[in-house]
Image: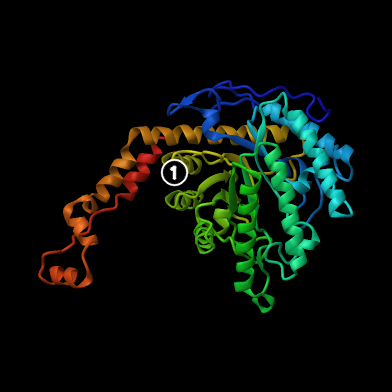
Amino acid sequence: MTEFFADIAPVRYEGADSANPLAFRHYDPDEMVMGKRMEDHLRFAVAYWHSFAWEGGDPFGGQTLIRPWQPQDDMARAKLKADAAFEMFDILGVPYFCWHDADIRPEAATFAESLRNFEEIIDYFLAKMENRKTRLLWGTANMFSHRRWMAGAATNPDPDVFAYAAATVKACMDATHRMGGQNYVLWGGREGYETLLNTDMGRELDHMGRFLNMVVDYKHKIGFKGAILVEPKPQEPSKHQYDFDAATCIGFLRKYGLEGEVKLNLEQGHAILAGHSFEHEIAVAAAEGMLGSIDMNRNDYQSGWDTDQFPNNVPEVALCYYHILRAGGFSTGGTNFDAKLRRQSLDATDLIAAHVGGMDICARGLKAAAAMIEDGGLEAALRDRYAGWDSDHGQGVLESDLDSLFARVLAGEIDPQPRSGRQEVLENHVNRFV
């Protein structure tokens, strides 16, 4: 064990009555839910960037989290960080983790040197994974932090930056493939604009579409069997980002012929910034057959930015998993904790407790969602509300035309009478389970 986690034992399931802050009360990996192990439903992953790369800064203050592996300026510290990370995976018993390239290797003076560092740490990861259960849910490239990305990556006005981005993604896809990753994710934090005065939006969108087609072509070239995912977010760090929300991304994918190749990685905090609920974004993606994976977190509703806090709201989480289960559950995707400690939470125990709480909230939400589905009350209400469309009359309306429908309404043959949507009744029904 590293010194960082030396006094923390593996977290165990102790049941709902446990008062132990480092024990699971609801998350029992082997509990069967709708005929499937809970661990296999939820497919938890730890985000390497927030858990190990983040230093506790905010827009008005610098580092508060002092870790033994910081600064990550040489391979020795990068490997120490990996040692601590895999120890935490063991403590939590998580099946997956996720990374950006910049999280795991030191940045060097040239691309070639950075690539050597990256490949060395991937080898180090693979050695650690040989005798562990933890695998890679997805890899991705950080193309938003370094100053080279200040005007975007795939949408940059400089073709050299586009080319550098292509090389970066190739390296990250190769590493993800080597590690048996389940997905590869692209998040366009600077694929957007600060002002339209210096932005050719049509050209930038075309370039982003071309870039994503290159990614898909390379996936097939190397035989990567995982999913390619894009992640919506409306703004921050850019003023406006082209992957605004699930519906925007789906329209973009259809425009560039990618709807059969790319799915969505959805985040709760990003949904809130877009003016939606997480439930809404999941339902949109599921309706279009493009639900891939989720980043589980929450935002502070009093703050105007993406605060990436650990989830703590069972009713919200339950409705999210309700839609996920109705869509058939995850295939390659999972529940990644794209969440970070508060900058006053300094200790290793805080990091473990945050994940324990988040995993328990998700487990409780999953069980509530499964119970709602098994009860069938919501589905029955939905069938009843739309039953008219299943009748011969309803099908006839769809197959008719404006002139025919006008004539029938004018003749008094069709005279609609409003019916209650029963929203309060259904909300009360949900509350029985959460």
Above or below 345: residue 196: below
Percent position of residue 201, x then y: 62, 72
Q: Is residue 133 left or right of residue 391?
A: right
Above or below 236: residue 347: above
Quarter of the image for residue 306 reads bottom right
Q: Is residue 429 left or right of residue 386?
A: right
Q: Residue at x 71, y 44 (%)?
A: 174
Percent position of residue 200, x then y: 64, 75
Percent position of residue 298, x then y: 59, 47
Residue count near mark 1 (Cα–Cα under 10 Å), binned few <14, some 14–19, many ≥20: many
Count of picture labels: 1
Quarter of the image for residue 80 reads top right
Above or below 22: residue 192: below
Quarter of the image for residue 29 reads top right
The residue closer to the viewer here, 11 or 138, is: 138
Q: Which residue is mark 1?
A: 323
The residue closer to the viewer here, 45 or 260, is: 260
Residue extending farthest to the front is: 221
Disc 1, SS: helix
What residue type is disc 1 on? Answer: His
Q: Is residue 56 visible?
A: no
* Quadrant in the picture for the N terminus: top right
Q: Is residue 41 left or right of residue 300?
A: left
Scheme of colours in the image: rainbow
Q: Residue at x 18, y 62 (%)?
A: 416
Q: Residue at x 61, y 39 (%)?
A: 182
